[in-house]
């Protein structure tokens, strides 16, 4: 290989000395698409190779491994989002430097903070994705639910939850009434404990004589057999009223 004592120049300032589109330079090249990059001869492939892909206007660095595996290429000058997904999907890490779009966010915990200069209340809002989507009587507008599994990941346990439910027609045509339902998990599965109705009533779950709950000071339940409410005094006393 010849050794030049100084910078190499073309005698025509408007002509190139090297043309990266000819793909004969080890370590760097310009390709029309990913397929062209994947087809580069193995003699020209090297770790750290810089490849510019024209049809997507992005440049990548080869990290080693399988040349045609896209996960072995790292974007230069910004991240590359994976293809696919739908509006409002979330990007989830699926491996080292790899992500995928998911319709459901799965995470260990969520902390919500409001960092505005004059922050208002932080909020969790359940909202229909399509503003034109109709809401009907009895629709669940949103739900906060906990779930678990038996040892070994078998049958799911009961799911205590709080549901926000469209519960009735309003006096104004532009709104539907809504309430809040509270569910607990017991040996019989997930059961409604009580609800806050749209007209501000607290409605307790119905309990028959055959399933009287354990007495707890201040506890209250409605007995369907006796059509009465009971409130817990000092155990084991129970006071009836109604």
Image (cartoon, rainbow, N blue to C red):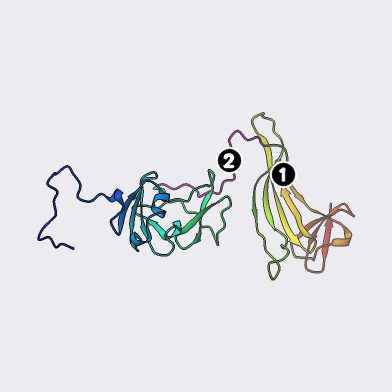
Determine which residue is flagged by label 1: 197
Secondary-structure class at tag 1: loop
Give the Cα separation between the discs numbered 2 and 1: 25 Å
Q: Main secondary structure of the magenta part?
A: loop
Is 193 placed left or right of 123 in the picture?
A: right
Closer to the camera: disc 2 or disc 1?
2
Query: Picture coordinates of residue 48 (x, y %)?
Result: 33, 62
Determine which residue is flagged by label 2: 129
- Please give the range of residues in magenta: 118-135
Classify 10 Å Cα crowding around label 2: few (below 14), some (14-19), many (20 and above): few
Secondary-structure class at tag 2: loop
Picture quadrant where residue 186 is located: bottom right
Query: Picture coordinates of residue 112 (x, y %)?
Result: 50, 54
Q: Residue at x 30, y 50 (%)?
A: 22
Which residue occupies the foreground of this view, 138 or 119?
Answer: 138
Is 228 placed left or right of 218 in the picture?
A: right
Q: How many marks?
A: 2
Q: Residue furthest left?
A: 5
Which residue occupies the foreground of this view, 163 or 177?
Answer: 163
Classify 10 Å Cα crowding around label 1: few (below 14), some (14-19), many (20 and above): some
Is 56 placed left or right of 227 in the picture?
A: left
Query: Picture coordinates of residue 70 (x, y %)?
Result: 44, 56
Question: Which quarter shows the N terminus?
Answer: bottom left
Q: Are marks 2 and 1 in contact (CB under 8 Å)?
A: no
Q: Residue furthest front?
A: 1
Q: Residue at x 30, y 48 (%)?
A: 21
Indicate which disc residue 90 carries: none
Q: Residue furthest top?
A: 173
Q: Residue at x 50, y 50 (%)?
A: 122
């Amino acid at each position: 290989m010849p050794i030049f004592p100084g910078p190499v120049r073309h005698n025509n300032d408007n002509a190139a000395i090297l043309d990266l589109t000819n793909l004969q330079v080890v370590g760097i090249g310009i390709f029309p698409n990913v397929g062209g990059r994947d087809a580069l001869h193995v003699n020209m492939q090297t770790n750290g190779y810089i490849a510019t892909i024209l049809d997507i206007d992005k440049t990548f660095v080869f990290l080693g491994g399988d040349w045609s595996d896209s996960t072995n290429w790292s974007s230069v000058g910004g991240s590359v989002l994976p293809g696919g997904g739908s509006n409002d999907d979330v990007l989830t890490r699926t491996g080292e430097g790899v992500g995928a779009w998911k319709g459901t966010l799965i995470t260990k915990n969520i902390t919500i903070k409001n960092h505005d200069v004059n922050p208002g209340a932080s909020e969790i809002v359940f909202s229909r994705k399509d503003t034109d989507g109709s809401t009907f009587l009895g629709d669940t507008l949103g739900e906060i639910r906990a779930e678990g599994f038996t040892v070994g990941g078998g049958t799911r346990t009961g799911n205590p939850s709080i549901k926000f439910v469209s519960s009735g027609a309003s006096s104004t045509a532009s709104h539907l009434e809504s309430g809040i339902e509270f569910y607990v998990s017991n040996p019989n599965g997930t059961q409604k404990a009580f609800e806050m109705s749209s007209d501000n009533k607290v409605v307790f779950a119905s309990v028959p004589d055959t399933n009287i709950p354990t007495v707890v000071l201040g506890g209250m339940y409605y007995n369907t057999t006796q059509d009465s409410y009971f409130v817990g005094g000092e155990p084991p006393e129970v006071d009836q009223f109604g």
